[in-house]
Image (spheres, grey):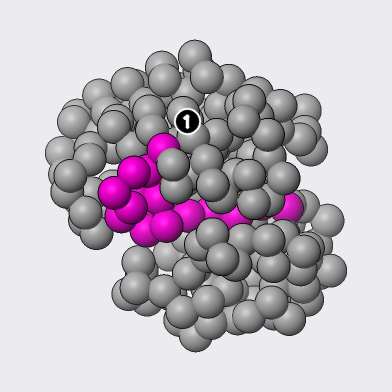
Amino acid sequence: MKHIGKLHVLTDTVLQNRFSHIDLTRMALEGGADTIQYRQKVGKTRERIETALAMQALCSEAGAILIVNDRVDVAIAANVDGVHLGQEDFPIEKARDLLGPDKVIGATAKTVVQIQQAVSEGADYVGFGPIYATGSKADAGDAKGLDGLSAMVQAVSVPVVAIGGIGLETAQDVMAAGAFGIALISAVCCEDDPVAATRAIAGSIGMCDQIVGSGEQV
């Protein structure tokens, strides 16, 4: 069975530059994240692979999983746990052919049609949002709200991971609306203390301090 975590932290070095992807991985894991997503839009492929290898080692040691955003080639080269693909990224079916049946594939979807298509093509979970207005992604689109999230959860049987503008004050509401998990960027990466920020949100959604490795299986 595949591990789909409940607390996904997307590493980012564009919104902030105090911490590296590796630093953020280490701190998010210490705070209780059970899934790390390596989000790097620019840079040399070799350097991305080296970073992914280091991040995968940290995640493996902690019992968490590492997902690479967009780059199937980097995911393969670093032998990470999976990939997350947007609507304009590598086709899900082709990614499944290359990665094999055991790797996790997540897909971004903003409508019922997109979600259902992603699932039919082999996605193990879908990332849906933005739930709230967000500045972390320029093309995120209009906020979907909690009602929109609930509708998406009802539309598919795979886990729905909510993203977009979610923070400590709203995480509980998002989970109560039916999300399997939440994905965070600025709420962790842009905080002065990413460890404390992650830990606070983990606690707010009912995850104990030692959650890593105990995520639900699907």
Disc 1 target residue = 29
Residue 21 placed where, x, y %? 29, 37
Q: Residue at x 81, y 69 (%)?
A: 155
Residue 149 placed where, x, y %? 70, 73
Confirm whether the magenta stretch covers residue 22: no
Quadrant of the image containing the N terminus: top right
- Snapshot quadrant of residue 135: bottom left
Residue 142 placed where, x, y %? 49, 85
From this viewpoint, which residue is outermost toward the bottom? 142
Confirm whether the magenta stretch covers residue 186: yes
Q: Residue at x 78, y 76 (%)?
A: 151
Q: Is residue 217 above or below residue 189?
A: above
**Segment tinted magenta in the rendering:** 180-195
Q: Is residue 111 above or below residue 167?
A: below
Q: Secondary structure at mark 1?
A: helix
Is residue 190 in view? yes
Q: Horizontal placement of 43 versus 24: left or right?
A: left
